[in-house]
Amino acid sequence: MTMMLVKGRYEIKNFEPDGDTVHFLPDDPGFWPELPGEHKVKRNAHGGAGLRLDGIDALETHYQGVGPDFVHQPLDLGAHAARDALLTWLGFTNVTRGADEKVTSATPDTVPGFVLASGADTYGRCIALVGRGTPTPDARSGTMIRVDVPLLRQSANHELLSRGLVYPTFYSNLPRELRLDMAATARQAQAAKAPGSVWATDVTHSGAQIEDLSSITDRLVILPKLFRRLADYLRLFGPSLDSLPAYLAGADDEFFLSEQTTSTRGLHRVIDINDGTVKLRPGIEDIVFVEK
């Protein structure tokens, strides 16, 4: 599969970057409309756009969902670590933020880099592999480049995954060759359970005991996709999980398991719910979600 090379710079002041999203200002924003797919990149007045790092999912630092207020996953158990690692890798230092997670200052104001873009998601964010400096091999912006594993390993996506700071979360737009390499990288990080990684405290497979919303916002580390579904459910219906299977069925997440050729609908089909405990059965890296 080819992806579009777009050169530019990252900017974070007055934005709210986290471990898998950051703002990017291309040298030439005229290439955004040329990305494939039915969704288009949502640009600001300067041509900048939000990026969603492909193939990974970081703990939430400010998720709104169905509620009037933002909620987050445990900030001191990985949410801030992934964000800080991404910004440091890109080249930012002396980053200061307000209580709302918005960056108020950073050194330098912007850093040069490039993205390998495959399209946009339903929120208008560009789905991309995120690079710094100049890509190898180099080419002009707008060039469609075949992305292989060595090029993948130049990205922040791979860096964060290899350090265990983010979860693998694959969508159907990600080429199989890259997905298999990222899955192997994630398994290595999971086995290492390095201090400070999400795997050191993850309970996605061992079981998350849900008492109330604070269970997943303050104490328990779980797959962000599952966190978002649980956070919305708990804010709508309270701590009883009796209706969670029906709620997950209604969310209608569509995905493939391992190398299956027929998709499955609804996370309730791969989650066990017993005595207030929620547990995901298949390996996270064995799930491929269908991009909506």
Image (cartoon, rainbow, N blue to C red):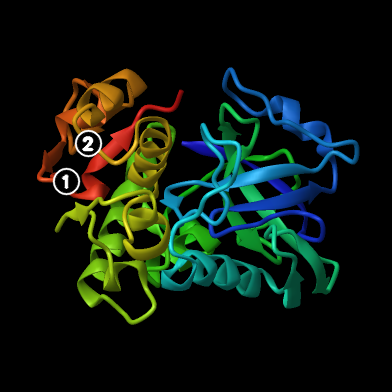
Q: Amino acid at mark 1?
A: Gly
* Residue plotted at (25% across, 50% down): 210
Q: Quadrant of residue 206?
A: bottom left
Query: Would residue 155 be seen by someone viewing this image from the given angle?
Result: no
Mark seen at residue 228: none
* Residue plotted at (51% across, 72% down): 81
Residue placed under numbered mark 2 in the picture: 241
Task: Judge left or right: residue 62 versus residue 234.
Answer: right
* Residue plotted at (61% across, 30% down): 123
| Extreme-right residue of the structure | 45
* Residue plotted at (18% across, 49% down): 283
Is the Cβ of the residue at disc 1 closer than 8 Å to that at disc 2? yes
Callout 1: 10 Å neighbours few (<14), some, many (20+)? some
> x%, y% of residue 88?
63, 75
> x%, y% of residue 101?
67, 60
Residue placed under numbered mark 1 in the picture: 276
